[in-house]
Image: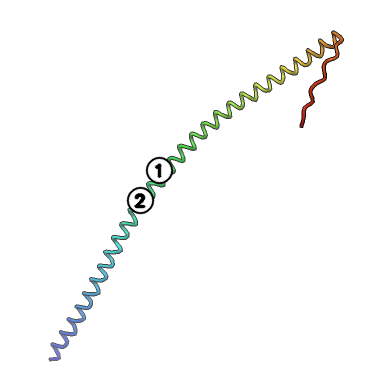
Amino acid sequence: MGEIEELRRRLEALEAEVHDMREEQAATRHLAVNSDRDVAALREQRRADVQLMQALRQTQLEHSKTLEEHGKLLGALVSGQVAMMEQIGTLTTRVGAITEHLGITPPEQPRAEG
């Protein structure tokens, strides 16, 4: 009977080992399924992030173009302002020369507040 008991003990050990292996296999399968879900979610998030970055890039390009156009317009306005100030200076000098020639006292200049 010693041999049968030995076989029974070995069979029980083998059955326990098979049981443990099946549990490990089920846990591994569960981890694999969850990993696949996590990877799919990460891929979806990455796609959304890439789309967002592309949209931000496009907006940045549009804003840069608008700022460049505004800069050109502002430059033109400043140039026009400078030209007008030069003309006003020339006119003021000429009016001063005319009033002096005619002996007229020019009206009082408005005072700048500031």
29 to 76, vertically: above or below: below
For image coordinates 55% across by 30% down, the residue present is: 68
Q: Earlier in the sequence, mark 2 or mark 1?
A: 2
74 to 100, vertically: above or below: below
Q: Position of residue 109 (x, y in %)?
A: 80, 21
Furthest residue in direction bottom, as rendered: 1
Q: Position of residue 24 (x, y in %)?
A: 27, 70
For badge 2, the amino acid type reads Arg
Disc 2 secondary structure class: helix
For image coordinates 35% across by 53% down, the residue present is: 41
Q: Nearer the viewer, residue 96 or 75?
A: 96
- Identify the residue position indicated by label 2 in the image: 43
Q: Quadrant of residue 11?
A: bottom left
For badge 1, the amino acid type reads Gln
Q: Position of residue 63 (x, y in %)?
A: 51, 35
For image coordinates 19% across by 78% down, the residue present is: 15
- Identify the residue position indicated by label 1 in the image: 51
27 to 90, vertically: above or below: below
